[in-house]
Image: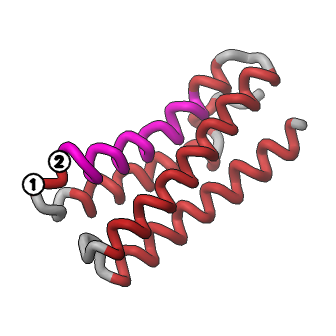
């Protein structure tokens, strides 16, 4: 198994977390304990779970952590839709972030399928 830092499936979510933090900085302060916290934690959990699973050096553990990361992707897709519906994200930002999370999900699915 390659070191997680060498994996594109880990690198892309790291960049995605940065994008999420930058976008949510613009949200109203009333959302600090709501959507800001929720979407940031879900975003951070993606590369964190990939790293933890990879570091366990056990295929069953790695698969479990990759599936948790994939679940966080679904959580973010939901939260992005809510943010768009509440006009916290403009259409351009929503589309960029949504496309990013779809790409990450596809990468995770590919890695999961290759390990099974």
Q: Specify the quadrant that holds the N terminus.
A: top right
Up/down of 82 relative to 115, above or below: below
Q: Residue at x 59, y 40 (%)?
A: 69
Q: Choose between 28 and 57: the one closer to the eye.
A: 28
Main secondary structure along the magenta-highlighted residues: helix
Q: Residue 55: x, y in percent? A: 64, 20
Colour scheme of the rendered structure: secondary structure
Which mark, by number, is residue 78? none
Up/down of 48 relative to 7, above or below: above
Q: Choose between 89 and 47: the one closer to the eye.
A: 89
Callout 1: SS: helix
Q: Specify the quadrant that holds the C terminus.
A: top right
Up/down of 59 relative to 94, above or below: above
Determine if the magenta segment contains residue 75: no
Q: Residue at x 24, y 58 (%)?
A: 24
Number of numbered markers: 2
Residue named by callout 2? 32
CA gap, disc 2 and disc 1: 5 Å
Residue named by callout 1? 29
- Mark 2 touching mark 1, by CB under 8 A? yes
Left or right of 75 in this view: 30: left
Q: Residue 14: x, y in percent? A: 46, 46
Q: Farthest residue toward the left? A: 29
Left or right of 114 in this view: 81: left
Magenta residues span 32-51
Q: Residue at x 41, y 65 (%)?
A: 80
């Amino acid at each position: 198994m390659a070191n997680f830092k060498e994996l594109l499936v880990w690198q892309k979510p790291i960049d995605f977390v940065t994008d999420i933090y930058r976008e949510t900085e613009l949200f109203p302060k009333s959302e600090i304990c709501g959507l800001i916290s929720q979407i940031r934690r879900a975003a951070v959990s993606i590369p964190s779970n990939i790293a933890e699973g990879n570091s366990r050096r056990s295929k069953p553990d790695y698969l479990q952590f990759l599936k948790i990361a994939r679940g966080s992707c679904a959580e973010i897709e939901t939260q992005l839709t809510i943010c768009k519906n509440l006009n916290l994200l403009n259409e351009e930002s929503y589309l960029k972030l949504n496309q990013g999370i779809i790409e990450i999900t596809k990468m995770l699915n590919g890695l999961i399928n290759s390990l099974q």
